[in-house]
Image (cartoon, rainbow, N blue to C red):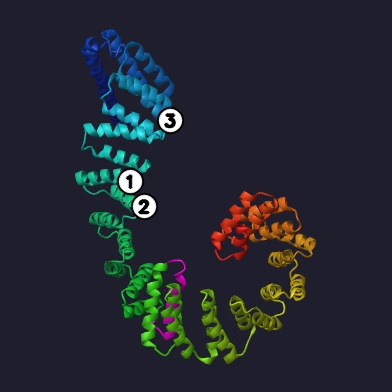
Amino acid sequence: MKNIFFKYKYFLFVCVFLSWIIFSLSAIADINTRQKLSAKADSDTIPEKKIVSKQDSDKAKELFVEGKIFELQGKNSEALQSYRAALKYEKSAGIYYAIANLFYNQGRFKDAMMEINNTLQLEPESVKYNEIKANIYYQQSNFQKAAEIYEDILKKDRENVSYMYILARIYQELNMPANSVELYEKITDLAGYDFEVLKRMFDIYYNYKNYDKCIEVLKAALQLDPYDISFLQQLAALYARLERYQEAKEIYEDLFRLNPRDKDIQTELIKLYFRLDEYGKGFENFAILLQKDTLTYEEKMQIGEIYYKMISQDSSVMDIARNIFTSIKADYPEEWGPYFYLGLIGVINKDSADYDKNFETVLKLVPEAAGKEIYMQIGYTYFDILRNEKAGNVVSKAINIYGGDFRSYFLYGLILQRKNEENQAIEYFEKALELNPEDLSVLSTLALAYNTAKRYSESEAVYERALMISPENPLILNNYAYNLSQRGVKLDKALVMSKRAVEIEPNSASYLDTIGWVYYMMGEYEQARYYIERSVTINPDSWVVLDHLGDVYDKLNDKVNAIKYWGKALELNPNASEVKEKLNR
């Protein structure tokens, strides 16, 4: 019984194999027939076409079949020899094509191209032969040539979806998205929606931020599978991006009903409730997320703080944070917290009337226990946005109410220094230093303030004190060296310190300028030019450094470059009177 079954399977295999051989032979015979019919008429343009004797034709077929058998057995060298031998008897397009295909499958694209060109010399209009030539170009990354061939093919077969798809892929390689999309749309018109085609259309539209078209594609994909969660989530996210929040919310609500344990879906839904001012639903769902029945004031504030902290990474959540705090303010009008965060959001939006009003309310409502810290935070906020009068008023009030401490004295000193009230600033820096005698920020700032006030011995004493604490601090080393160089004193000491600062931070534009200026004051102008030019390369927007470089070129008797860099310095600081004097002399 087993032998009979084996013989039956063998018989089927032989029948299939012979059918394939007969198909190959018929292709050759068809080629031969056409060659014989056109040999005389076309003998001048294609000399290979000639009448072939039956004996030669039969021999060619025999060798061709032999080659195919070898190829099926994986004996590529023997197959190639048989095909080459067949060509000696008959120059057939089918045989050339077989050789080209053999080379193509082996990755020998250069050889494949040579053979397919021989094929097309005999049958230039064959779609099959042109197709493999295009594929060879594609494998060689010559996408332009591949596209040209497929474009010609589609002119002859305008509704061939397979060729459209291939050409659309090639257009993507050529970064021609409009052409790709046009073909993909034709494919969907002819063959209906297909996931792979829709995916490629979506990617193209998304990369070019055509979100409306992305939505159309996703809707088409959902016609194929209405319950695909990934498509629904993408569609909801796109609606949210386009501020179509109601539509986004409806999708997320459906998804949440289907997946009530999915925290990501629930989180997105909560965001949308807050965006749409549906605070009740927002807090209710957050309570569910936290596995609670209701939320306290503190818990609601924590939710708002979460979204506020996200603003630095995603500015789109600012509206969510604002809506949350606005809702809390409405429910708890005597609590200072929501006003504080609404003030901070106003600062981000540069709405001075808004944040001034909210911060004033905070300072009225804040309890004494938390007041000092809140005063300082508001003071720092005003200082950061250059509202020096406001900052000074808030910090001064904090000192009067709660007494001074290190932070309040130091910040108030910085505010006074910014207002050019140097001597008063020094008083507060000294108070801060008494409370924290080893703080390097205060030491460095006080040393600079003494230097500005021309209290040089005190300045140097504070710098020395700072270096006793941190002898390798590059900022202290640099500032001390620069102050000495400005006065033209102790230049050897200044050079040692500035060299060490540059060794520690070799790419600091400020430190490079300092060592350059030390060399300038020592009369070593080439060294000065070297370092100050490096500083300008790193930071070309410092008018002081550009002025320094102009001075260096002036000493090197290069008046053209001196004027050039003084001019650049004046562009950055039109009020620099000393630079104007240099240009006018």
- Cβ atoms at labels 1 and 3 below 8 Å apart: no
Amino acid, disc 2: Asn
Residue 511 image offset from top left, x and y in percent = 67, 60
Residue 291 image offset from top left, x and y in percent = 40, 78
Q: Which mark is residue 379?
A: none
Q: Which mark is residue 177?
A: 1
Q: Secondary structure at mark 2?
A: helix
Q: Could you say which quadrant of the image residue 248 lies in?
A: bottom left
Frontmost residue, 240 versus 376: 376
**Earlier-in-chain disc, 3 versus 2:** 3
**Which residue does the image show at 22% across and 11% down from the upper left?**
41
Instruction: Note whether 470 is above or below 542 in the view shown.
Output: below
Mark 2 neighbour density, 10 Å: few (under 14) some (14–19) many (20 or more): few
> In the image, which residues are magenta?
292-314
Which residue carries the number 2 mark?
207
Instruction: Note whether 369 is above or below 120 in the view shown.
Output: below
**Whole-number angstrom distance, CA of label 1 to CA of label 2:** 10 Å
Which residue carries the number 3 mark?
107
Residue 286 image offset from top left, x and y in percent = 38, 77
Mark 3 neighbour density, 10 Å: few (under 14) some (14–19) many (20 or more): some
Q: Secondary structure at mark 1?
A: helix
